[in-house]
Amino acid sequence: MGSQTVVADVADELARRVAAGEYQPGDLMPSVRQVAEEFDMNRATAQLTLGRLESYGFVEARRGKGFTIRDVREAGGVDVYRQLFRFSIPMPDIAIEMFRDIVDVERNLVLETLLAYTGCAQRIDSAEMKSTIDELESIAREHDPDLSRLLALEVALVRRLLTALGLPMQRAILNSIGEMVLEVPEAVEAYFAGAPDLHVLVWRALAAVWDSGSGPSEAQLALFEDLFGMYHEKVIARFEELVAGVEESADENRAATA
């Protein structure tokens, strides 16, 4: 195992302990010597490991004291939240709470984008959009669809709409949400709680509305919003099932090695 892999693995374990509350904000992290001894590594590698943890935003270096644990939940930005979510998966209660927040923000952002684009005079290239939807359909029809690729393409479609609407801040938030979800296989799978084909059908229906130029009726919009909300509840429910499975597997592994 290479030194970089060791550094990443140990930094991830230390970050998991912070995420789980095993290390409290304001406390000192184990010293370089303690990390080296616990994980059977030399001090130079232990120093790199703590430096990596600092790059995650979980600790900060204090001259003459070592590394102090940050209150990552209170003071962390999007990048820290992303790391917290990644390390929370073995802790279902925390993971589900965080995922629900992610889904709520994503749902509101995407819904507002779709509705705003429907009433916007500015249009992106229809042929370009249809080409991406065709690619979505091609992947969705595969025997074992690449769900990460499907989700990345959907994020790219919404990103183009936000660009057309002139909303760079919302686009940056969308990109951050996409990165968070795509790093966690359980989250990606949850976003396809319904068949991938359903995603394709929704995009084709939206493209048809935008091409028509007439726009949907108020009743159609209300129905779309209701369906959108129901879909996201299914996404959260599916995620709950998946992370419960992660916890069960971890319990079985612990029992087997006890």
Image (tube, rainbow, N blue to C red):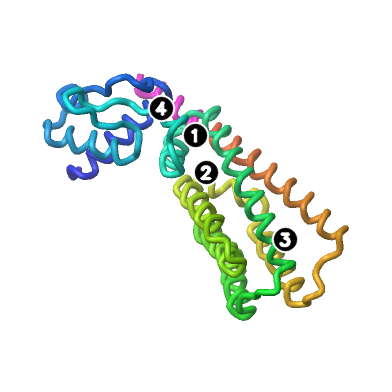
Q: Residue at 69% x, 61% y: name it.
A: 114
Residue under numbered circle 3: 115
Q: Residue at 17% x, 42% y: name it.
A: 3
- Front disc: 1 or 3: 3
- Marks 4 and 2: CB-CB under 8 Å? no
Q: Is residue 147 above or below residue 19?
A: below
Q: Would residue 188 appear left or right of 221 to someone viewing this image? A: left
Mark 3 or mark 4: name the one nearer the start of the chain: 4
Mark 1 or mark 2: name the one nearer the start of the chain: 2
- Marks 1 and 4: CB-CB under 8 Å? no
- Cα gap from disc 1 to disc 4, whole angstroms: 26 Å
Tell me the element at label 2.
Answer: helix
Rendered image: mark on residue 71: 4
Residue under numbered circle 1: 246
For the N terminus, the image quarter is: top left
Q: Main secondary structure of the magenta part?
A: helix
Q: Residue at 82% x, 74% y: name it.
A: 214
Q: Give neighbour class at mark 4: few <14, some 14-19, many 20+ (Cα, 10 Å).
A: some
Mark 4 or mark 2: name the one nearer the start of the chain: 4
Mark 2 or mark 3: name the one nearer the start of the chain: 3
- Marks 1 and 2: CB-CB under 8 Å? yes
Q: Nearer the viewer, residue 176 or 90?
A: 176
